[in-house]
Amino acid sequence: MSLLQKLGVSAENLAPEITGKYIGKPISRVDGRAKVTGNAKYAAEFNIGTGILYGYVISSPIAKGKITAVNARQALSQKGVLNVFTHENVPGLAWFDRSYQDQDAPPGGSPFRPLQSDEILFSQQPIALVIAETFELARYASTLVHFEYEVKEELNVGLELNLYKAKKPKKHRFPVPKPRGDAEKALAGSVVKIEEAYYHGYEHHNPMEMFASTVIYGDDDRLTIYDKTQGVLNSQSYVKSVFGLSEDEARVISPFMGGGFGAGLRPQYQLYMAVLASLELKRSVKVVLTRQQMFSFGHRPATLQKISLGASAEGKLQAVINRCYSETSTFEEYTENVVNWSGQMYQCDNVMLDHKLVPLDLFTPLDMRAPGGVTGMYALEVAIDELAVKAGIDPLEFRLLNYAEKDQNLDKPFSSKELRECYRQGAERFGWNKRNPEAGATLEGNNLVGWGVATGCWEANQMPSRAKAMLSADGKLTVSSATADIGTGTYTVMTQVAAETLGVAMEDVLFKLGDSVLPMSPLQGGSWTMATVGSAVKLVCDQLKAKLFKMAKKVENSPFGNSKEEDVVFADRCISLKEDAQQYLTFTEIMRKSKVNYIEEDTTSLPNMLEQNEYSRFTHSAVFVEVKVDQDLGTVHVSRVVNAVAAGRIINTKTSRSQVLGGIVWGISMALHEDTVMDDNFGRFMNTNLAEYHVPVNADINDIDVIFVEEHDDIVNPLGVKGLGEIGIVGVAAAISNAVYHATGKRVRDLPIQLDKLL
Ligand code: MOS
């Protein structure tokens, strides 16, 4: 009896490619146990108690000026303090240093290089690194280093104060579409119109894990670097470039990450600091940033969008104008895709989009979960709600009335777009048809109740990636790629794809990632890992199958002599004939009979750009929200959320749901809580801690319902997946904002919606 039959699986029921044994199932994380038992190690947790040195970073108290004097004598006189690195004594960078220039996600311009000059460009700029035998000593010694400064009083912080400095970026990462039609004229001729401005301020990434680098100084001056990063190859190429090292001299490892959210797309300065000290002292060094210092590099940029919309009396959109202003630093040009969504989401012939940058005396902004998407969709989706209200049309109805059948920005069809179905299923689950059209009219005890809807949209990209697979004669499969798991579940989903493709149990698969010696893979970001690395894993396992089948045909008395690969099934570590499941060979038999201990494949998966470029490729969602607003206190509670998401094939319904849940929680945070407050006089963020930088707690989160709408897509990548890392947050803040309006009749156009704005 074949193993298949023993398990009660009939071969006829197994599709040749994706059998559905693992794919599409709610499978728990393969690394779950390691994580909850503390066995999963993070960058700062390696080599504790091994005589490693500790670095403590000193941050500038001034926002702009020059360091005129440094006195480290007192610090250096402490027993156990080895060095204090400042701009006065650090070695120069490698002559060919390109710093971030070779990275996957660089803004243009000249990246900030720590300790390379006496100039202070932003508050909390790292100005020294104290190295000591213990962390506590390094921290104490940091208080004994004295700096003198020449302070420049004239500070440019605050987006709206500096709008007059706005200018077009030299190079936009996401070119703004050319105007179509005549938006100004169409607006003037519209019966229904709105002209409003929408704003959100600075927001900072606050993953649980602090940025950390542990550098192990090894034999032959080789470094092994445990770094908190979304891409080990990214960190490695940075270190190679800055310090002039070869690949062998700097290996970067990052098996786990305690949250990235975009903050780890670029190497942060603790990596530079730790490597610098290690190379200079020829010792192992660990540098961990403090929570306060987590506010000293990139953030979601404060953004102002002036939106004008015009519609006919029947609610047909006639004009869309979005003039956007967002901040950048004085030394780099950071752009994100904020306005393009305004030209893409709805059918409209007259569109004018513009995006200008305002340079401020702050660190350069940085991609944060759905960068630009949450920002652009927030403003657009509130504006659409306002227009629908003015037109006297239900906001969901209004969206359906202006549904875009093709991407007008690119003038291309969508590879797939089940947004209509998201609206339908979401509305049904939420009970939208029972909505009272009147705002401020539903009272429940002392609470005003409001319902809001908004659309979400995000990119569905595939990048090139390599993967390697090795099947041993005992049926164990090892698959590897240098990708990351920033908390998304990469280990689990890649294990699923590998097990499913080759026909082995998940327990027999080991997926390795997060090591620069592994096959090339891009950093984990842009929601592209499943599409990118997943496709590479599938491809390499397919190649392994072909190799194994070729071998199987050649073994003595092979049942597959005249068969083709389409005629057989790979399942339960066997190859069997589709027609006759009794005819099978186990993987072990095939390899034993062929006298090999293992077989291996290593391959690169490339997106089919020729085909993909014919289409516009995006995920979509419809977010429905209920809020309860206390009439007297103005406090807002999000009592219900339904988010219906169309993101192609769902590989793991459990980890996918977790991704979307996390996105929704962050959307609630964006709408109601998060705000880094700037002291305009000192150019300094004031609430650089989790006590004052508010994020939701359990009491803020109630019912959340996630629906995955079925969506078939043959274009996006061989797996038909679209990625889920970012779509969950998009649209949430707008839906909450719209619900708050529906509850109270008050329209708040800047985030977060704090209670004082409702009183
Ligand atoms: Mo994401 S902001 O691409 O990590």
Image (cartoon, rainbow, N blue to C red):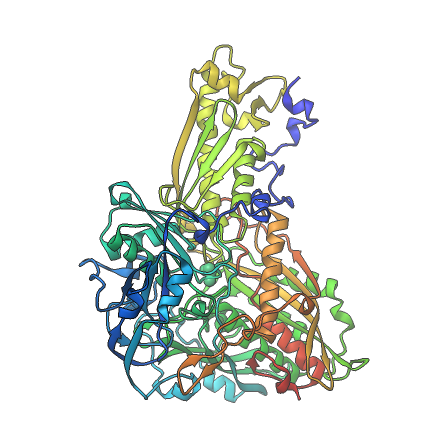
Residue furthest top as drawn: 557
Residue 340 seen from this side: yes
Question: Would you identify the image quadrant in which residue 584 lies?
Answer: top right
User: In the rendered picture of this protein, how many numbered marks are placed on residues?
Assistant: 0
Residue furthest right as drawn: 445
Query: From what the image shows, is residue 500 above or below residue 364?
Result: above
Which of the two residues, 477 or 547, is positioned nearer the viewer here? 477
Provide residue 96's location: percent of width, then percent of height: 19, 58
Which of the two residues, 420 or 479, is positioned nearer the viewer here? 479
Which of the two residues, 56 or 258, is positioned nearer the viewer here? 56
Residue furthest left as drawn: 95
Quadrant containing the C terminus in the rendered view: bottom right
Query: From what the image shows, is residue 3 above or below residue 676?
Result: above
Provide residue 301's location: percent of width, then percent of height: 44, 74
Left-right relation of 223 to 717: left
Provide residue 171's location: percent of width, then percent of height: 32, 70
Which of the two residues, 90 or 294, is positioned nearer the viewer here? 90
Residue 337 seen from this side: no
Provide residue 257's location: percent of width, then percent of height: 48, 53
Left-right relation of 526 to 63: right
Quadrant containing the N terminus in the rendered view: top right
